[in-house]
Image (cartoon, helix red, strand yellow):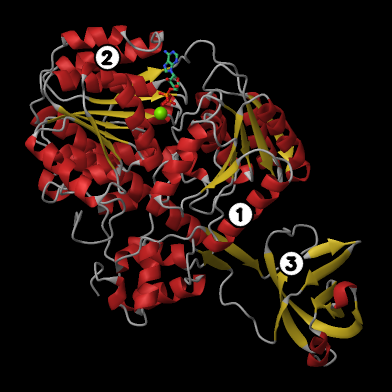
């Protein structure tokens, strides 16, 4: 079977299923194999009162003893209570509205009960457990995928099973590395990631794929680095006269750190090899203006600038800001996103091609293959952690000589930055604009959530605005949407009655999103209830409250990013975390947030906590752009992969790594790409 075969060609996949899979980003067989579980469900076959875990499921083999009762309870429901015994414990099974269940058993008959276990008054209870006469489940660990539409875990498992039955996946790491790090084979890893034989096998598979992902990533960085350093003649930009005028009419004075970053960038611009620089600065540190200064100078050198943002909202915001800043200098700016009307899009593309258009701000649409630049001089990517290194590579391929400037607010510990951004020079903006007040952060258990809303209300009455962010829980999109809509109805009619409340989520089209953002910016909307579409970059200085619902579901960097949406003006701002503190780790994480406003500190603490946290689940902290690696936790793997990639890179022929000048894909299973043996 060809791994690049379209998913719709697979037996048993009809057009509807294919379409739904496409919406999950699955187009080929390879995509499906790399559609990694979001989480795992552990089913334990051993139960003991001393060390059972309430959140997990147990399958308990026991004997039926007797019917305790079957009676009507509240709301006309029927409750049937049966007693079982497994030789060690008495187990009370309770079923709602299944009175017939009591007729199913003979005394002393052996059955399996499957479900969660509760201990109530020293008695072991299972509510609505599944009953089976034979061992129900084949496996103890069951993969759970991110689901959409009609796709179920079963559909995905079945299809993957079908594929794995017919193929054996070829090893594609150098054999000496597999041995040196005791890695399981790629074939084993893919099988066990979907159908774990044991938690040990699962862990080994994850490690193998993490290594692979970080190794491939490191190789790509080296490729990019070499291209920029050795193979390309850069453009020798000069400092233009307009630039000094521009710096004089900025709406504010630059901070020392901003000035330093600007200086470093301008030095790079003068050099004979292309710039490849990361500007790293905490949220609100003022990275945008630094990028605009760089863009401005390139423009007056007569070259084009492409400025990419991760979301349309952000692209639109940068566009508006650029219009204002550049107006006096007659610099024309264009906006090109997925929702730009086709006619307009074509016009802009035409102008980029013939050189009429010079500065273009946009989303991923900018790197589509059919966007051609006549003389691209600078590529800026904002919030780089959201872009894969692939996109960066693609843009580099667009012009041999263009400078590259990436901006990131994800402060990662310095020890990791070295490996993660191995290809980049780094400017750090470690100073906030003057007059910023520390954002007061409070944390409430979900049972006290109303206190958070009251806090917001106080601010609204002073004329401020508030964000409320809900995470997507991913299990079921429609349910998520319903839950945010329910919250919307509730808030608008109770706490925030009399204020204008609006809702913003990823399912809305760009036009709607844009309008709502504009209304919020203009102050016509007081409370914006949103999913994480507002996570990065959005700038509304009058907003002074950020409420984050289900804060336990976010990574700390993400919380810090979200919090960074407030405290961007002169007002004292507040961040309210509403979390279900199920365990100590959640509580500790929330405490880190209340204690510190320093992104670097938070990220370091996060790294420490993750070292002690749960190991499984791949997408919980999906904020670094990796499929499976969690760089804050997998620092050791990152370091090893980085070193090994360096060795392989320097010793192999480039054609082995680069195929047709394209930068290789993230985790490669296909033999079409890297293949060393
Ligand atoms: P980020 O680094 O998070 O991208 P922005 O570039 O969006 O931050 O800047 C945040 C806010 O701070 C913006 O409103 C911007 O105009 C303002 N700002 C940036 N630099 C300064 C400065 N030196 N003095 C005052 N305000 C500034
Ligand atoms: Mg920004």
State which mark lies toward you, 1 or 2: 1
Q: Secondary structure at mark 1?
A: helix
Q: Earlier in the sequence, mark 1 or mark 2?
A: 2
Residue at point 54%, 31% (across, down): 523
In the picture of the structure, the residue carrying the numbered disc 2 is 264
Q: Residues within 10 Å of mark 2 (few under 14, many from 20)?
A: some
Q: Residues within 10 Å of mark 3 (few under 14, many from 20)?
A: some
Asked which quadrant contains residue 69, the reply is bottom right
Q: Residue 310 in the image: x percent, y percent?
A: 36, 40
User: Gap between marks 1 and 2, in whole Å?
Assistant: 47 Å
Q: Earlier in the sequence, mark 3 or mark 2?
A: 3
Would residue 86 be visible to someone looking at this image? no
Horizontal placement of 638 versus 564: left or right?
Answer: left
Question: Which part of the image, by quadrant, shows the N terminus?
Answer: bottom left
Q: Nearer the viewer, residue 562 or 672?
A: 562
In the picture of the structure, the residue carrying the numbered disc 1 is 485
In the picture of the structure, the residue carrying the numbered disc 3 is 47
Q: Residue 482 in the image: x percent, y percent?
A: 60, 59
Horizontal placement of 301 versus 112: left or right?
Answer: left
State which mark lies toward you, 3 or 2: 2
Horizontal placement of 503 versus 116: left or right?
Answer: left
Q: Nearer the viewer, residue 473 or 216?
A: 473
Q: Residues within 10 Å of mark 1 (few under 14, many from 20)?
A: some
Q: Secondary structure at mark 2?
A: helix
> What label does residue 217 carry, if any?
none
């Amino acid at each position: 079977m060809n791994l690049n075969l379209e998913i719709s060609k697979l037996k048993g996949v009809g057009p509807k299923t294919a379409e739904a899979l496409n919406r999950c980003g699955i187009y080929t067989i390879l995509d499906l194999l790399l559609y990694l579980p979001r989480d795992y469900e552990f089913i334990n076959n051993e139960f003991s009162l001393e060390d059972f875990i309430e959140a997990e499921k147990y399958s308990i083999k026991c004997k039926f003893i007797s019917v305790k009762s079957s009676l009507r309870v509240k709301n006309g429901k029927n409750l049937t209570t049966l007693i079982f015994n497994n030789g060690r414990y008495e187990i009370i099974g309770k079923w709602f509205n299944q009175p017939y269940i009591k007729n199913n058993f003979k005394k002393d008959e052996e059955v399996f009960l499957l479900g969660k276990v509760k201990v109530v008054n020293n008695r072991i209870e299972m509510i609505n457990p599944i009953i089976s006469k034979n061992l129900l489940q084949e496996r103890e660990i069951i993969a759970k995928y991110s689901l959409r539409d009609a796709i179920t875990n079963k559909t995905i498992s079945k299809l993957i099973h079908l594929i794995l039955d017919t193929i054996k996946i070829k090893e594609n790491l150098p054999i000496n590395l597999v041995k040196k790090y005791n890695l399981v084979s790629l074939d084993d890893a893919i099988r066990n990631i979907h159908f774990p034989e044991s938690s040990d096998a699962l862990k080994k598979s994850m490690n193998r794929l993490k290594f692979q992902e970080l190794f491939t990533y490191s190789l790509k960085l080296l490729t990019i680095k070499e291209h920029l350093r050795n193979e390309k003649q850069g453009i020798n930009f000069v400092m233009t006269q307009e630039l000094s005028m521009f710096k004089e009419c900025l709406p504010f004075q630059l901070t020392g750190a901003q000035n330093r970053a600007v200086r470093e960038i301008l030095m790079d611009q003068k050099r004979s090899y292309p710039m490849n620089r990361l500007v790293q600065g905490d949220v609100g540190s003022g990275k945008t203006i630094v990028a605009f200064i760089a863009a401005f100078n390139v423009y007056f050198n007569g070259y084009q600038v492409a400025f990419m943002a991760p979301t349309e909202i952000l692209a639109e915001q940068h566009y508006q800001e650029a219009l204002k800043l550049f107006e006096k200098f007659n610099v024309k700016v264009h906006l090109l996103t997925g929702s730009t009307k086709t006619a307009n899009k074509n016009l802009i593309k035409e102008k980029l091609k013939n050189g009429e258009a010079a500065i273009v701000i946009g989303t991923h649409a900018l790197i589509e293959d059919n966007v051609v630049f006549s003389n691209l001089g600078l590529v800026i990517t904002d919030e780089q952690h959201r872009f894969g290194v692939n996109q960066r590579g693609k843009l580099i391929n667009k012009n041999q000589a263009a400078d590259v400037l990436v901006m990131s607010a994800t402060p990662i510990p310095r020890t990791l930055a070295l490996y993660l951004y191995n290809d980049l020079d780094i400017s750090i903006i470690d100073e906030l604009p003057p007059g910023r007040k520390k954002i007061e952060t409070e944390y409430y258990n979900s049972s006290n959530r109303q206190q958070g809303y009251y806090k917001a209300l106080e601010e609204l009455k002073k004329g401020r605005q508030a964000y409320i962010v809900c995470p997507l829980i991913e299990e079921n999109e429609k349910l998520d949407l319903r839950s945010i809509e329910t919250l919307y109805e509730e808030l608008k009619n109770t706490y925030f009655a009399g204020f204008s409340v609006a809702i913003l989520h990823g399912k809305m089209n760009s036009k709607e999103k844009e309008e709502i953002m504009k209304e919020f910016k203009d102050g016509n909307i007081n409370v914006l209830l949103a999913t994480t579409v507002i996570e990065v970059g959005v700038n509304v200085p009058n907003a002074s409250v950020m409420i984050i619902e289900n804060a336990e579901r976010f990574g700390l960097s993400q919380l810090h990013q979200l919090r960074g949406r407030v405290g961007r003006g002169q007002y004292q701002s507040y961040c309210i975390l509403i979390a279900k503190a199920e365990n100590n780790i959640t509580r500790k994480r929330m405490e880190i947030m209340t204690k510190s406003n320093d992104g670097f500190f938070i990220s370091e603490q996060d790294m420490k906590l993750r070292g002690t946290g749960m190991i499984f689940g791949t997408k919980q902290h999906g904020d670094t752009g990796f499929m499976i690696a969690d760089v804050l936790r997998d620092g050791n793997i990152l370091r090893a992969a980085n070193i090994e990639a360096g060795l392989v890179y320097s010793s192999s022929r480039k054609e082995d790594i680069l195929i047709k000048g394209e930068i290789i894909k993230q985790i490669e299973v296909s033999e079409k790409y890297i293949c060393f043996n």
